Amino acid sequence: MKVKSWLVVAAAAAALTDFTAAYPEEALSGTTLSGTPMVVIRLNATQSNRGKIAVATLLPGVPDCCGSPRTELRVWISGVPNPTTLPPRVFTYIYPGQCGSLGPQPAYDLNRRRVILGNGLPGSIMWISRRVEAPINGLTSSNYALVLRTSPADGNVDIFCGNLKGNPSIETPPANPS
């Protein structure tokens, strides 16, 4: 279990390292180009996926052609329940509400493109990249929850959930003190 934890943390660190390499001044100050902090959220495994771990990062994305803000979402997961069809297909949603009391429908269905990197074999780390058509501040200041779910072929089972607001696992680097 500790080895998997370290692997997920290493994967998240690698992603943030890619960001710091591209934007060293912003990374040193702990903020992104727009001045908004990066957010790291630990996702909790559901009963059907006990023993697995996941982490998500939210970064401000490049605005769309009309100037509407976007958020880049990256998720690293240590595994899916057994038995799950390989390679696993994990669906990603942002629901209104909090884990344990989600709204009836997702506010954001992030499954137009389902790209999962990693083979899903035991001991491997999978990561998912998505774009949310909403500003990062709106997602983290309102009651939303990130939900990962297995495919319909695997029963549409919720496997991870993390609150985007009020999550004690949210880590935002400090703003530039100058």
Image (cartoon, rainbow, N blue to C red):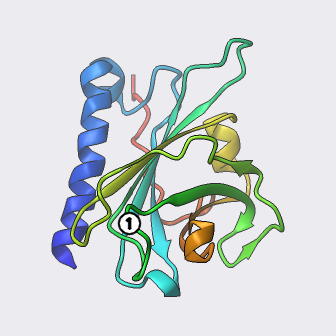
Residue 177 horizontal side relative to residue 135, left or right:
left
Q: Is residue 77 above or below residue 81?
A: above
- In this figure, which residue is indicated by the disc labeled 1? 86
Q: Tell me residue 14's x, y (percent).
A: 23, 42
Q: Quadrant of residue 167?
A: bottom right
Q: Residue at x 69, y 68 (%)?
A: 98
27 or 158, which is in the foreground?
A: 158
Number of on-image labels? 1
103 to the left or right of 52: right
Element type where label 1 sits in the image: loop
Residue occupying the far left of the picture: 3
User: Residue 123: where, in percent of width, then height?
Assistant: 21, 70
Quarter-wise, where is residue 164 in the image? bottom right
Is 24 rendered above or below residue 173? above
Q: Can you say which quadrant of the picture contains the N terminus? A: bottom left
Residue drawn at point x = 33 percent, y = 56 percent:
126
Image position of 109 with respect to 6: above or below: above
Is 88 placed above or below 83 here? Answer: above
Q: Quadrant of the C terminus?
A: top left
Q: Is residue 88 left or right of residue 29?
A: right
Q: Quadrant of residue 156?
A: bottom right
**Residue 12 image position (x, y, % from top left):** 30, 49
Residue drawn at point x = 24 percent, y = 35 percent: 17
Position in image of residue 40 (x %, y %): 43, 51
Task: Say which amino acid is labelled 1.
Answer: Leu
141 or 68: nearer the viewer: 68
Circle 1 packing at 10 Å, graded few (<14), some (14-19), many (20+), is few
